[in-house]
Image (tube, rainbow, N blue to C red):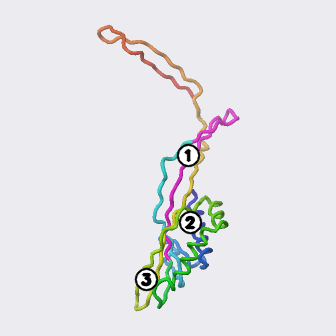
Amino acid sequence: MDWATIRETIRSTIGYVAGVASTDIRWVGTPEAGTWHNSPHIDLVLSRVAAVGVDESRYEYLPDPDDAVKMTQAGQWEITVMVRVEADSQVNGEEAVGQLMSNIRTRLRRPEILSALQTNGLALARIEDTINADFVTQDRMVSLAQTNLLFLAAESDYLDDFSDFIENVQLDSDTLDDPAGDPEDPQISILVQS
């Protein structure tokens, strides 16, 4: 997976559907997150990345005998992103940030948005409930709403230096006797040449 592309795809998509300038959307833990921001602004937190099942190995036999086998590792991933919408406001609750969160929740499901995500290797799987958590700081009300978005992604890693394959296998079998002179199971030796 190309994490730079995934991060930028999510950031620009959230900005587009929310109607907020891209300069007011930041990934937490990045250098731009520490700069001054306008109100309202949106913080994105990469809260969970998990593999779904076990990666699979795929082998493809190529027509050219010099590159007889192409191996690819492929796997499915779940990516959870917390979206926090924050606004300076003297008004409690949904009036301050509710419209922005509503825009995100409803517009993310538009076909053109889902198609744009898919073009960049992502699929929107789930939008969790919105939590409002207003708070007071420096005698001012700050309105906060947050939700989690679950994206699915697939990773595929083509191993282009995987060109070795087994040409010959020689099997030899001998029956050995145990110390008492009784025959034991056949012993097999394998010689592999590549």
Residue assigned mark 1: 73
**Quadrant of the image containing the C terminus:** top right
Q: Is residue 13 visible?
A: yes
> Residue at position x 49%, y 64% from top?
80
Q: Estimate the x, y position of residue 143 in percent, counting from the top left.
A: 47, 83
Q: Is residue 30 visible?
A: no
The disc placed on residue 7 is 2
Residue ranking furthest to the top: 181
Amino acid, disc 1: Gln
| Label 1, label 3: how far apart the Cα atoms are | 45 Å
Which secondary structure, mark 3?
A: loop
Amino acid, disc 2: Arg
Q: Is 78 one of the magenta-colored residues? A: yes
Q: Disc 1, disc 3: CB below 8 Å?
A: no
Residue assigned mark 3: 134
Q: Estimate the x, y position of residue 33 in percent, counting from the top left.
A: 50, 75
Magenta region: 58-84
| Label 1, label 2: how far apart the Cα atoms are | 23 Å
